[in-house]
Image: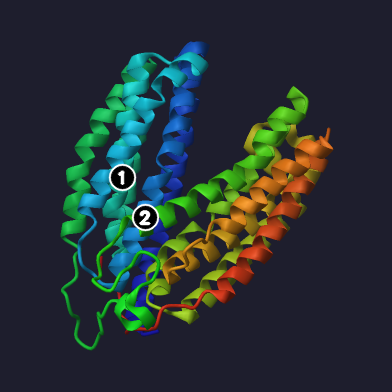
Amino acid sequence: MSTTRASRLARSGPAVAVAGVLANGLAYLAPMLGGRTLPAAELSALATVLALAAIGSVPGLGLQIAVAVHRARDGRDSAGRLAWIAAGICTAAVLAAGPLLIDALQLSIAMVVLLSLATGTAVLGCRWLGELQGDQRFVRLAVAMTVLAVTRYGGIIGALVAGLDATGALLTGVVVGVGTLPVLAWLAAGARPPATVAGVDRTPVGEATSGGTIAGFAADSRLTAAAVITASSATLAMLALSYADLIMARYLLSPGDSGGYAIGAVLTKGAIWAPQVVTIIALPRLARGDRRARRIALGLVALCGAALVSASALAGGLAFRLAGGPDYAYLGGYAPYFAAVGALYALVFVMVNAQVAAGARRPATPLWITTVGLLGWLLVTRPGSIQEVVVAALVAAVFATAVTAMAMRRTPMPVPTGDQPPPAG
């Protein structure tokens, strides 16, 4: 790695990490602020809509991954039509589920409409994040992530501070979010690389491999719906697996224990997303067949996970106190279990992204199998304590890591086609 490239990564890595922390922090801040400004019923409705928006935006994460892989391999812009289609489908799906949401969750018609618009906007915005990620313009990517997070949640937060109700806050968030899309497009437009770079082979990986096709990346270098669906399915499977134990804890445990488990799950999520920047930066390199990048990414994520598990073992009570308050400090002995689950899932996330980058057709299969197995085991055994549920989750995480590692080893990496250093910014 050249000194110039190392310095660029040293600058862009922290920028992306800070943007990720800011995005996650604002996502937590909105409902926390709502708890201080809204009646209980409106707070519940707002929190429910925000949770549904996060779930509905999963296809956007898949779109971002697919676009990033495509851009890293070829550099051409052919994702616009698919991005609009994906956003339209997600918007329509929320509207179609509207009667169920209104009846089961007691949401207003206005909230359902706003939820559909917020979902479509978030999915569409991921197109430009994928372009920036695939072009390895990580400083611009960090700026775009920050802009998207600030506008997505900042509008809601500002409206709550101004004294608006839940519907008014959501409307403000949607309006501000839609207004952000041209900014994201401008950031991505200023980052497009030339078709060729001196000394760099920009031949699409799909053309350099046997048969000319890798799971949705055809020899004509066009991004297909199959690639987006594959990446979205993998992202959805990871989300389902990481939330399965939390949902079952709510179903199986007493209210007090399920509340404690929810606090422990915060440690799990923190361990999953703490090394997220590594995967973001490594993905374009993985798409171009860089085995060294895969080894480094896995090593860094494993090192981060080991550090978090060790810290939770030494200061578990403090971790629970910070996550949920002093009432939960007595659960500190379980902290290493929750952190270990998250650390293993972080490794799984890297390996699944590596498979998507390599063109695997069904990278989500091991995750769905693990999810079904975990749910089945908990339903049959019906554990009655936090320890029993988190141990089952840890066993599932170990199994998912092992099976995903085997699948990754069986997936041939793309044929290396040259090295494009990331441009400044």
Q: Nearer the viewer, residue 364 or 134?
A: 364
Which residue reaches farthest bottom?
199
Placement of 183 over or under 350, stated as above or below: above
For label 1, the SS is helix
Residue 101, percent across and down?
45, 21
Which residue reaches farthest front?
211
| Residue 86: image tag | 1
Residue 142, percent across and down?
33, 55
Q: Nearer the viewer, residue 18 or 251?
A: 251
How many residues crowd around disc 2 within 10 Å: few (fewer than 14), some, or many (20 or more)?
Answer: many
* Among the 4 quarters of the image, the one containing residue 267: top right
Q: Residue at x 33, y 29 (%)?
A: 116
Q: Nearer the viewer, residue 192 or 271?
A: 192
For label 2, the SS is helix
Give the colour scheme shown: rainbow
Q: Is residue 243 visible?
A: yes
Q: Is residue 171 left or right of residue 321?
A: left
Q: Residue at x 60, y 54 (%)?
A: 367
Residue 83, percent across and down?
26, 49
Q: Are marks 2 and 1 in contact (CB under 8 Å)?
A: yes
Q: CA distance from mark 2 to mark 1?
A: 9 Å
Q: Residue at x 68, y 65 (%)?
A: 402
Q: Amino acid at mark 1?
A: Ala
Q: Which residue is mark 2?
A: 228
Q: Is residue 110 left or right of residue 317?
A: left
Q: Earlier in the sequence, mark 2 or mark 1?
A: 1
Q: Is residue 298 left or right of residue 387?
A: left
Q: Is residue 163 visible?
A: no
